[in-house]
Image (tube, helix red, strand yellow):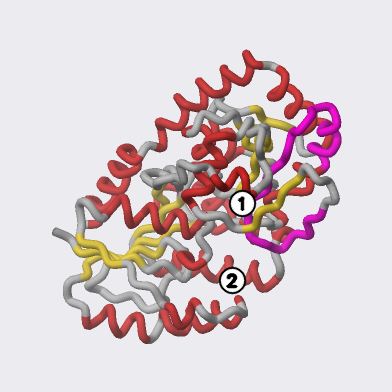
């Protein structure tokens, strides 16, 4: 049985997109392979993100490589957080995952330092990995476009659900804590970054909320690089919420809202569809690929988004249709399907 090492790139600490992907990767592999996924608690404790990234890259190319070179049992090493050692060990196959090309497509959505880090991470993966994977066909085309790489050299393995096989709080106390007595609310989940476009959700909600008694907007996510503010008492910003409580929020939501300017995939879309929640999202290529016909796609302005919100709230036939189509669509991203994709990839690495 192959022994695989997953180097998380400090992503597990944040429990966000890449962290979710890394956790899912471990769960998908552990039943069929011997898998190690060690944490680096000393590095994780560093609060300054720039210093943390620099020290991580230094550690990855020194201490990590030394340990890996003396470990005779590891045959494959996954780098799901993109950054790949710039020294290649012959006895170990490197598999790196590029999640987006935001620094090329939308550099204005990140700081210069963040863009430099993304560029370096993608460069290291493309130049030193034995196999480069990405999470959607949209990203595959974009990587090829911006980094002058043949599409045939890039594999695609979709994300799967982030809340699969996670127990939820059956008392649903999170609804009381967030002041949602009526279960009449719209939901957004994600880091509060510029690419998430959360202020559009807020402005659209404020445009229609007076017409719907007790309707609330729940925004779940850590503070990011965008400035988010509202005095509307029906907008509840929860900060980070545990997976078991997040599952409750998905299960009871009227609709899931996702007006991102840019994404590499969009895990919350398939999470919402799996819970039978209709989705309203931005009309960008990767969302067309991921959501299928199980979502309403909107233009990125307040009037258009508010109009789609009203459709979801008032048209039961449309809601039910989106729920049925979403349920059918999310089957493409089942654990079984993604496991098969991974298995095929690893067999090719033999």
Residue sticking out furthest to the top: 317
246 in relation to 315, above or below = below
Report how far apart the C-alphas of labels 1 and 2 lie in the structure. 21 Å
Image quarter (top left, top right, bottom left or bottom right) of the N terminus: bottom left
Q: Nearer the viewer, residue 285 or 185?
A: 185
Is residue 300 in sight in this rendering?
yes
Residue 66: image location, x then y, percent: 30, 85
Q: Quadrant of residue 125?
A: bottom left
Q: Sort mark 1 into few (<14), some (14-19) or many (20+) by Cα contacts within 10 Å.
A: many
Mark 1 in CB contact with mark 2 (< 8 angstroms): no
User: Does 312 sit left or right of 168 as displayed?
Assistant: right
**Residue lying at 78% horizontally and 42% vertically, measured from the top left:** 234
Q: Which residues are magenta?
A: 203-229
**Residue lying at 61% horizontally and 38% vertically, measured from the top left:** 285
SS at badge 1: loop
- Callout in the foreground (1, 2): 1
Image quarter (top left, top right, bottom left or bottom right) of the C terminus: bottom left
Which residue is disc 1 drawn over?
190
User: Does 78 sit left or right of 320 as displayed?
Assistant: left
- Residue 214 is one of the magenta-drawn residues: yes
Residue 277: image location, x then y, percent: 56, 30
Residue 202: image location, x then y, percent: 78, 44
1 or 2: tag closer to the N-terminus: 2
- Residue 297 is one of the magenta-drawn residues: no
Residue 297: image location, x then y, percent: 67, 30
User: Does 190 sit left or right of 23 as displayed?
Assistant: right
11 in relation to 234, above or below = below
SS at badge 2: helix
Q: Which mark is residue 117?
A: 2
327 in relation to 62, above or below = above
Is residue 141 in sight in this rendering?
no
């Amino acid at each position: 049985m192959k022994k695989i090492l997953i180097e998380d790139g400090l992503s597990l600490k944040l429990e966000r997109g890449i962290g979710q992907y890394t956790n899912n990767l471990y769960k998908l592999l552990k039943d069929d392979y011997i898998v190690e996924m060690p944490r680096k608690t000393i590095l994780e404790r560093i609060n300054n993100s720039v210093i943390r990234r620099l020290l991580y890259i230094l550690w990855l190319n020194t201490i990590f490589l030394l340990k890996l070179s003396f470990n005779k049992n590891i045959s494959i090493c996954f780098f799901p957080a993109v950054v790949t050692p710039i020294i290649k060990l012959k006895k170990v196959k490197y598999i790196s995952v590029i999640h987006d090309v935001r620094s090329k497509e939308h550099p204005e959505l990140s700081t210069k330092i963040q863009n430099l880090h993304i560029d370096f991470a993608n460069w290291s993966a493309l130049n030193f990995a034995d196999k480069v994977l990405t999470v959607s066909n949209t990203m595959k085309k974009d990587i090829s476009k911006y980094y002058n790489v043949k599409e045939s050299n890039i594999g695609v393995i979709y994300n799967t659900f982030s809340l699969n096989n996670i127990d939820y709080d059956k008392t649903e106390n999170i609804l009381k804590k967030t002041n949602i007595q009526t279960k009449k609310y719209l939901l957004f989940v994600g880091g509060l970054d510029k690419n998430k476009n959360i202020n559009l959700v807020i402005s659209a909600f404020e445009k229609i909320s007076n017409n719907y008694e007790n309707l609330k907007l729940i925004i779940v996510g850590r503070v990011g690089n965008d400035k988010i503010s509202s005095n509307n008492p029906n907008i509840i910003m929860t900060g980070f919420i545990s997976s078991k409580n997040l599952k409750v929020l998905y299960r009871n939501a009227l609709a899931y809202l996702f007006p991102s300017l840019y994404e590499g995939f969009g895990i919350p879309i398939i999470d919402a569809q799996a819970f039978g929640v209709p989705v309203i999202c931005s009309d960008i290529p990767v969302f067309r690929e991921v959501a299928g016909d199980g979502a309403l796609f909107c233009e990125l302005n307040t009037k258009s988004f508010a109009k789609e919100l009203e459709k979801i709230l008032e048209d039961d036939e449309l809601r039910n249709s989106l729920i049925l189509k979403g349920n059918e669509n999310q089957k493409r991203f089942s654990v079984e399907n993604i496991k098969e994709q991974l298995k095929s990839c690893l067999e090719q690495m033999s």
